[in-house]
Amino acid sequence: MGDPRAFLTIHRKEAGYRPVHERIDDFSEVEQTLSTGDRRIQASRCMDCGVPFCHWACPLGNKQPEWQDMLYKGNWQDAYLVLSATCDFPEFTGRICPALCEKSCVLKLSCDEPVTIRENEASIVEVAFREGYIKPVHPVRNGKRVAVVGSGPAGLVAANRLNHKGYEVTVFDKHEKPGGLLRFGIPNFKLGKNIIDRRIRLLEDEGIIFRMNTCVGLDITTRELIDQFDAVCLAIGSEVPRDLPIEGRSLKGVHFALELLANQNRLLEGISVPEEERISCKGKKVLVIGGGDTGSDCVGTANRHHAAQVMQIEIMPQPPVGYNPATPWPMYPQVLKTSSSHEEGCIRRWNLASNRFIGENGVLKGVEVEEVEWIPAVDGGRPQMKKTGRTEIIEADLVFLAMGFVHPVQEGIIAELNLSVDGRQDIAVDACSKTSVDKVFACGDAVSGASLVVKAMASGKKTAAEIDRYLSGK
């Protein structure tokens, strides 16, 4: 390392967010960036700790100490080459990854000041684009063709890796533009869609074919894909939201979170959304049910619509601030997370279960919630929820359900793509991403259930290697 003792005198410095009064009126990215000088100083804090837990914690196996040192020394191009060897799209992970690497950084564990790994990653790839280090690659074709179903993070990584190995790759997607969750699930204020478009143009220049507005199973059958291609990769994601089937669920004003997020992103892209499907939070009392990132994204979107009030409720207890002794390293720390959206205005409450939606003339007016308690299990297992009988009515004009997504394999969703092959009602996926249907592989959230973008990318990377081994006879 260039300066293995810099961490002793240099503190962590984050770029931070744009001021609330400025960002609340637009959907541009909220996160700022440091100057290249400050960024190099932050990279110098990587302390040559001997055993890089950051590398261990990263699903992609990024070599953070190596490219931190190159960044500190001003070798931006070398830093990008090392970074891109393990991470296909650092411009995505550098913006939206929860930075598992930073949770395991020795400086996090010792003094709660981890290296700004995620921000440094984003800076490296942006310099690489700006300085022209990133150029289209045109590999020699090997004569074999692969179909990738789904253009989300897993599908894009699989397509990119296979394309670079010489396969002719065609990506099929039912949506209007590629990106999957990146484009239609994550708000622009976290990931500008021009960032996705820039990468897609590069992938197209390198030879990947995108067939959008094409639904596999309707516009083209699975049998046709298997017949036309040497291998098929299913990267359909996990996009069926978990419902809340309580009294009043059909009232006007109760929506899944992605109804708001996807429609808003489409409108910002200039994609037509039928008037009856548009959702406006302006001047309304908004209740978000679910305390995760998707719920937070709904909060930020509602704030930009200038809602009268935004509240987010969670059935689980409020996690502690800073450190949680119940989830010590190497477990993922379950601590209170305050997002940029929460900073813009949001009432947050915990230990509340929803009993029924209340309405008048078919229109939502409120939600009856009940306080719950969590009783620790005697065997150390999952705590048991106990309702207390203490209920109240929360007034709401709009409710957004952000409670996660069902597992595609467990719920038989992947199997639906297989019906046109041989009528089977089930499909299995082994440890090597190979399904029980010949020539068909699967990756990403379609296999694991809803997870992190970085884990989906890691799965796409692994599956591309498995497809290559399968087609090359290794």
Image: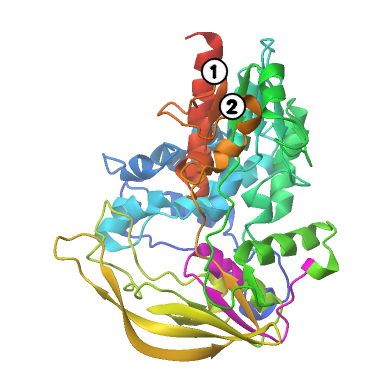
Q: Earlier in the sequence, mark 2 or mark 1?
A: 2
- The image shows residue 115 at horizontal and vertical percentages of 40, 54
- Look at the picture and state if 433 lies above or below 154: above
Residue 260 in which image quadrant? bottom right
Mark 1 lies on a secondary structure that is helix
Q: Are marks 2 and 1 in contact (CB under 8 Å)?
A: yes
Q: Residue at x 46, y 31 (%)?
A: 429
Q: Residues within 10 Å of mark 1 (few under 14, many from 20)?
A: some
Q: Residue at x 49, y 36 (%)?
A: 459
**Which circle, 2 or 1, is nearer the viewer?**
1
- Look at the picture and state if 148 lies above or below 316: above
Amino acid found under the numbered disc labelled 2? Arg
Residue 24: within the magenta? Answer: no
Say left or right for 354 vs 11.
right
Front residue (pair 208, 214): 214
- What residue did someone put label 1 on? 468
Q: How many marks?
A: 2
Q: Residues within 10 Å of mark 2 (few under 14, many from 20)?
A: many
Say left or right for 430 vs 341.
left
- What residue did someone put label 2 on? 161
Front residue (pair 228, 204): 228
- Where does the magenta region start and end? 277-299
Residue 45 appears in the rendering: no
